[in-house]
């Protein structure tokens, strides 16, 4: 089942912070975050694993609450380059070649 | 190092035709996954191949098939095209097909069915 992302869209000014949430109704093994700009491929940002391990972007942080089956992506001191659509992809088994993606959160950062 | 490459970039086909999309993974990556992305939605999983074997299949009809070659490149085939098959087809590669590793996406093939 597809994870649910919130909010659907957010508009920020440069320097402001944003939080994007991803919730699943099923147990998660891993959460993968991507950013996609219009007409481009999704770009890998971060992966969070059950047990607390994280791999990813230095300037973006995220959390993974296994009990609540939720993940949040924290964008601090946003820059114009942060604009795009953010997707979370959830993996339910140790083999995460198969990711189930949410519907996306569109972030627009204005000067 | 080159990233994931896909060909062709764009494709226009007529209903009922067949199409083959190609993907070359990042050098050293052995797993390839295919996704379909309809405008305004997140990518939807179609297939995963690892070491030339199918390791996962999404909820797509049998008109969709794929394979992986000894050099780890992959092809996605779609038969009897329908208007609803119009989408961006993304290929993603990862180091291995078991365990949890980052998936890196290629630029995609934009398929339009008329």
Image (cartoon, coloured by chain):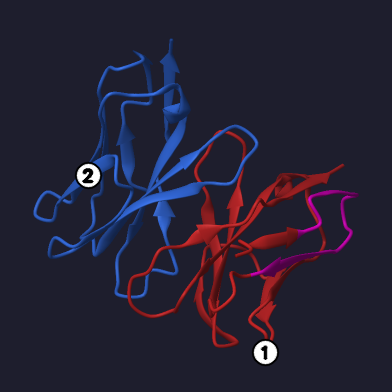
Chain colours: A blue, B red
How far apart are the two marked residues, 2 and 1, measured between alpha carbons? 37 Å
Looking at this rendering, what residue extends furthest in the left direction? A67
Disc 2 and disc 1 on one polypeptide chain: no
Q: Residue at x 27, y 24 (%)?
A: A77
Q: Position of residue A32 (x, y in %)?
A: 35, 54
Q: Residue at x 17, y 64 (%)?
A: A50
Task: Say left or right for B14 vs B81.
Answer: right
Which quadrant does the C terminus of chain B fall into?
top right
Task: Say left or right for A39 vs A75.
Answer: right
* Whether residue A69 is visible: yes
Q: Which residue is mark 2?
A: A62
Q: Residue at x 46, y 75 (%)?
A: B95
Instruction: Identify the magenta region.
Output: B7-24
In the rendered image of this protein, does residue B64 appear above or below residue A40?
A: below
Quarter assignment of residue B61: bottom right
Is A25 in front, or is A59?
A59
Is B99 in front, or is B85?
B99
Q: Residue at x 64, y 63 (%)?
A: B2
Q: Which residue is mark 1?
A: B70
Is A92 in front, or is A51?
A51
Q: Position of residue B39 (x, y in %)?
A: 62, 36
The local crowd at label 1, few if under 14, some if 14 to 19, many if 20 or more residues have their Cα within 10 Å, is few
The local crowd at label 2, few if under 14, some if 14 to 19, many if 20 or more residues have their Cα within 10 Å, is many
Which quadrant does the N terminus of chain B fall into?
bottom right
Q: Secondary structure at mark 2?
A: strand
Name the magenta segment's main secondary structure. Answer: strand
Q: Position of residue A29 (x, y in %)?
A: 24, 65
In the rendered image of this protein, does residue A63 appear above or below residue A19?
A: below
* Whether residue A1 is visible: no
Assess whether residue A69 is covered by the magenta stretch: no
In the rendered image of this protein, does residue A39 appear above or below residue A7?
A: below
């Amino acid at each position: 089942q597809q994870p649910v992302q919130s909010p659907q869209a957010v508009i920020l000014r440069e320097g402001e912070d944003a939080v994007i949430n991803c919730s699943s109704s099923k147990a998660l093994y891993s959460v993968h975050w991507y950013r996609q700009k219009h007409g481009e491929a999704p770009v890998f940002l971060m992966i969070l694993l059950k047990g607390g391990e994280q791999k990813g972007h230095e300037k973006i942080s995220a959390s993974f609450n296994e009990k609540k089956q939720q993940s949040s992506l924290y964008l601090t001191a946003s820059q114009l380059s942060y604009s795009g659509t953010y997707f979370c992809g959830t993996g339910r088994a140790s083999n995460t070649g198969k990711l189930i993606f949410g519907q996306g959160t569109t972030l627009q950062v204005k000067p | 190092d080159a990233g994931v490459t896909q060909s062709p970039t764009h494709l226009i086909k007529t209903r009922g035709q067949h199409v083959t999309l190609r993907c070359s993974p990042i050098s050293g990556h052995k797993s390839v996954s295919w996704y379909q992305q309809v405008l305004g939605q997140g990518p939807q999983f179609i297939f995963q191949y690892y070491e030339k074997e199918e390791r996962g299949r999404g909820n797509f009809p049998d008109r969709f098939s794929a394979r992986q070659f000894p050099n780890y490149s992959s092809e996605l085939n779609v038969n009897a095209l329908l208007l609803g098959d119009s989408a961006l087809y993304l290929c993603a590669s990862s180091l291995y097909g078991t365990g949890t590793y980052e998936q890196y996406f290629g630029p995609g093939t934009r398929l339009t069915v008329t």
